[in-house]
Image (cartoon, helix red, strand yellow):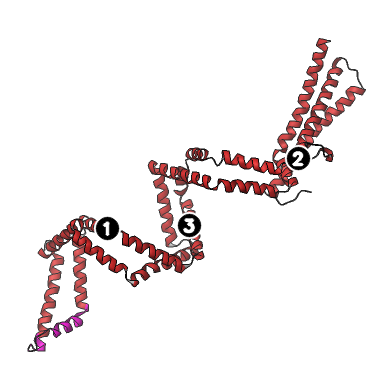
Amino acid sequence: MIKTTGPGPGSGYEERRTRELRRWKLRANSFLFGAFVVFLVSHFLGSDSGINGFIRAASEAALIGGIADWFAVTALFRHPLGIPIPHTALIPKSKDEIGTGLAQFVQQNFLDPANLRQWIENADIATRLGSWLVQPEHAALAARRSIETGATLAQTMDDERVAALITETSLDWLRQTSVTPLISLVMDTWLKGGHVDDSIAVALRGIDLVVKENRVFLRNNFARGEPWWLPEWAGERIFDRMVASFHVLVDEVVADPHHPIRRDLERMLTQMADDLRNSAELAARIEETKLRLLDSPDLAAAIGAQWEVVHESLQRSADAPGSDVERRLTELIQWWGGRVLADRHLRNRLDNWIAQAAERLAQQWDDEVIGLIETTVERWDPSEISHRLELQLGQDLQFVRINGTVVGALVGVGIHALLLLTA
């Protein structure tokens, strides 16, 4: 009785292959039985001359060829007729050797770095990936699976350790990275982008609002600096006049794009950008200030808290399909797929990276793969692997039996004719 556990596909596939194997066995046995019947009839109901001689020779050779091929095919999987003849039941006896040979075949032909690279280059994986991701439904699926995977991985991590790692890595990077060139780049981009006037207007309006909302605080501070002999009402009037004049000045500067104060501010900002590029002293002061800020416990806590934000965002997105994060990620993935299709250089880089990764994996894990194949085959039951292989190869092997019967008959006819010619 064949076990239901072990190597091979599901029961439906096995049942179909079993039916096909039985059908082909019946055909092969029918040819052999037919040769046997013809052999009996030709020997007991006819002479060995004329046409009957050819029929007799054909049936004899067909019977011999059919039985020989039946024996050879059967001997691969079991002992013919249950008799333990030497060198039969080859597959069950050689199961471990088959596993070793299969492992070596896989190693030499499938895990060879050169073969892997050639296959990947011919497969054009980057183009296939881009074509798949550019489809909206596929991009949405990739985004959904990415979020679910990210959320699952986040749940398995120690939040405190991850937060500490992010904090240490970020602070170390900031300590080793000069921020002055970055500030200079941002400032140059801002100045050249034509947004200086708007930024100045916004900044002045913000200062004006701060003055209005903190009038009482500013008045009290002004009063503390008044001379003792100045009457309170006079100090109040002076302060009001100063505040009113400041509001008027802000309105004038904001309303007039060519106001002198605007131009002075623009020149000051331009000079500051130039100093950021060229002043070693300013760069040193900025770096010194940066290092002092990086020593602040509050900054470290703020950086570490970002992991909690990311973790919660991933979990919310995983629990709520169609979230804003998922929608944006879908758009990003779809855009990237289109870029891959449009950029041949990027496709070549991706294919090369995939090929290099496959080569490294093949070199690093080939022994493990070989060991997995060998140990898996070793665990299989000998009768089970014999049954599985017979299901896979049996149809072709039964056809070999049919061919052996037919070819044997033709050879018998040829030999008989040759004997007649040489008699």
Camera-side residue: 185 or 379?
379
**How packed is label 1: few (under 14 Cα within 10 Å), some, or many (20 or more)?**
few
Q: Is residue 390 above or below residue 293?
A: above
Q: Is 233 covered by the magenta stretch?
A: yes
| Residue position for label 2 | 77
| Residue position for label 3 | 146
Local SS, label 3: helix
SS assignment for the magenta stretch, majority: helix
| Residue position for label 1 | 182
Q: Position of residue 413 (x, y in %)?
A: 80, 19
Q: Earlier in the sequence, mark 3 or mark 1?
A: 3
So how many labels did they put on this image? 3
Query: Mark 2 near mark 1, Cβ–Cβ under 8 Å?
Result: no
Q: What is the magenta range?
A: 213-234
| Residue type (three-letter) at the residue carrying disc 2 | Phe
Left or right: 335 with respect to 284? right
Left or right: 38 with respect to 172? right
Q: What is the CA distance from the residue labelled 3 to the residue labelled 1?
A: 32 Å
**How packed is label 3: few (under 14 Cα within 10 Å), some, or many (20 or more)?**
some
Q: Is residue 81 visible?
A: yes
- Residue ID at (75%, 34%): 398
Camera-side residue: 384 or 141?
384
| Residue type (three-letter) at the residue carrying disc 1 | Leu
Q: What is the CA distance from the residue labelled 3 to the residue labelled 2?
A: 47 Å
Quarter of the image that includes the C terminus:
top right
| Residue type (three-letter) at the residue carrying disc 3 | Ser
Q: Position of residue 45 (x, y in %)?
A: 92, 22
- Residue ID at (86%, 14%): 50
Q: Earlier in the sequence, mark 3 or mark 2?
A: 2
Q: Is 25 covered by the magenta stretch?
A: no
